[in-house]
Image (cartoon, helix red, strand yellow):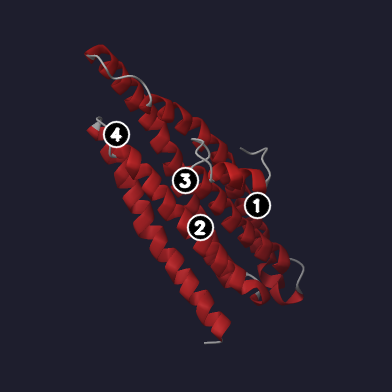
Amino acid sequence: MLNKNCTEFLDLLSSKEPVPGGGGACAFVGAMGIALGSMVGNLTLGKKKYQDVEDDIKELLVTSENIKRQLTALVEKDAEAFFPLSQAYGLPKNTDEEKAERERVLQAALTDASEVPLSIARCCGKAIDIFEEYAAKGTRIAISDVGVGAHFVKAALLGAQLNVLINTNLMKDMELKNKIETELDGLVEKYAAKADKISLSVENQVKGE
C-alpha cells in the first residue's frame, strides 16, 4: 500500500478488492491530520514572535513525525491483517469439519484485524494531545490548519472504532473482546471530546471571538 501514489490508492479503495479498506483509510486520514500539525509547527519555527516556545515546537515536531510514521505503517499493517480475515470468510462450510476449521481460522484472524485499528485509535489519541499544544503555541496564521488536522484525526479515531467493533462483535473470546472494547471506549470518550474542544477553540480564534 505504501508504494501506491494517491490516485492508485484511491482507485484500489473504491474497487471490490479486499484491501485497502476502512482501517487503512483511517490510518491514512490520521497521518494527513498529524502532517497538518507538523506544517503548523514548521511555520512557527524561526518566527521572532514565537521564540519563547521554539524549543517546545521542536519537541512537538519530533513527536508528530513519529506519530505520522506509525500511522503510515498502520496503512500497510491493516491490509496485512485484513487479508487473512477476508480469506477466512470465503472458506467452505459444508461439513461440520469445514465449519470448525473455518471458525478456527476466522477467530485467529479477528484478533489481528481488531488490534490494528485499535493501534490506529491509540495513535489518534496521541495526535490529538499534540494538536492541543499546537493550538496553544502554533502560529496564528495557520491556526485553521490545527482545526482541520484535529477534525481529520477525530474522524480517523471514530472510523477506527467502527473497524474494531465490527471484528470484536464476532469474537468468541469474551475476555479479549471486553479488554479491547474497554480500551477503545476510553480512547474515544477522552479524545473525541478533546478534539471537539480544540476545534471549537480554533473556530473561535478564526472568527476573532
Distance of label 2 from label 4 (alpha carbons): 26 Å
The residue indicated by pointer 1 is 62
At horizontal 55% and vertical 81% (from top left) the residue drawn is 205
Local secondary structure at mark 2: helix
Label 3 vs 2, first from the N-terminus: 3
At horizontal 42% and vertical 31% (from top left) the residue drawn is 112
Distance of label 1 from label 2 (alpha carbons): 18 Å
124 to 195, vertically: above or below:
above
The residue indicated by pointer 2 is 153
Q: Quadrant of the N terminus?
A: top right
Q: Residues within 10 Å of mark 2 (few under 14, many from 20)?
A: many
Local secondary structure at mark 3: helix
Which image quadrant is residue 139 in?
Answer: bottom right
Amino acid at circle 1: Val
Label 1 vs 3, first from the N-terminus: 3
101 left or right, relative to 5:
left
Percent from the top left, x then y, of residue 2? 64, 39
Amino acid at circle 4: Leu
The residue indicated by pointer 4 is 176
Label 1 vs 2, first from the N-terminus: 1
139 left or right, relative to 122:
right
